[in-house]
Image: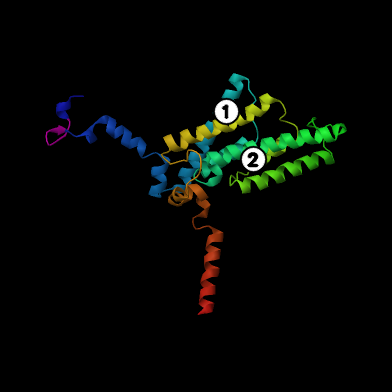
Amino acid sequence: MNQSRLPKVNGKINPQATVLFRTVAFFSKLRLGYLVHRGENTRITIVLFLITAATAALGIITATAYLAKLPLLYPPLAPSAFILFYTPMAPAASPRSVVLSHGMGLALGVLCLMAASMIWPQSALLDPTTMNWHRILVIGVSTAALAVLMVVFRCVHPPAAATAVIAALGYIISPLQILGLMGAVILLVLEAFFFIRILGGVPYPLWKSDSSLMRSHRILSEGVETRGGFWEEAVAQIYRKGRRGSL
């Protein structure tokens, strides 16, 4: 491009007139953070982002599992992806909550299964097709313990309960399967960081959620349904009636 044709300010080339600046400005207006704060078609924006990012993230994990011949595909990853990309600023979507909860769920499911197998060797708990009262006990203990630990350590992530159940059923026993599941969880978090923070322009946390950022990104921490939802309006009406009755 001939620089002599570019608009100048005080004898210097105006950078805002360059093609590079206009290109960057155009794509920056397509970022999730910019579109959400503008408040135009917020629901459609978040839904499209959820579909695109979650599909791409799970697709990458699927391709990696196929090419590397590794056990990376597990059912809990799908609901985790939904939470990560629908409410990325929520505590349940933070890397800390996702990694710790899935890790604890996996550990509790495997440990309870192994302990029960040693106590009742005739129960055949290592066979996933076996269902008896021993299996029911293992599932109940592992999921209950996980619920307590997630609350105690403040890393609540509901899909981790499915991880505990799958482990308690005996589907995750070998070291390769254990490493595969945790590797897939970490890969999903890294993909969330890339899609949400780098491409989306939203301050997705590096590890733990930030309460101040949650308030400034309420829709991305609570979901679009919380804005003027049915129950929110119902509570507001009850409160207003109570105020009028007390006067």
Q: CA distance from mark 1 to mark 2?
A: 18 Å
Q: Nearer the viewer, mark 1 or mark 2?
A: 2
Residue drawn 52% across the image and 38% down it: 51
Q: Which residue is mark 1?
A: 61
Q: Which residue extends farthest left?
A: 11
Could you say whether the residue bearing mark 2 is in a helix, strand or loop? helix
What's the residue type where badge 1 is placed? Ile
Q: Which residues are magenta?
A: 6-12
Counting from the top left corner in percent of width and height, residue 64 is at: 57, 23
Q: Which residue is mark 2?
A: 160
Q: Look at the image and say whether residue 11 sits in the magenta stretch.
A: yes
As displayed, is residue 61 above or below residue 228?
above
Does residue 220 appear to the left or right of 126 in the view shown?
left
Quadrant of the rendered image containing residue 26: top left
Q: Nearer the viewer, residue 222 or 104?
A: 104
Does residue 163 appear to the left or right of 45 in the view shown?
right
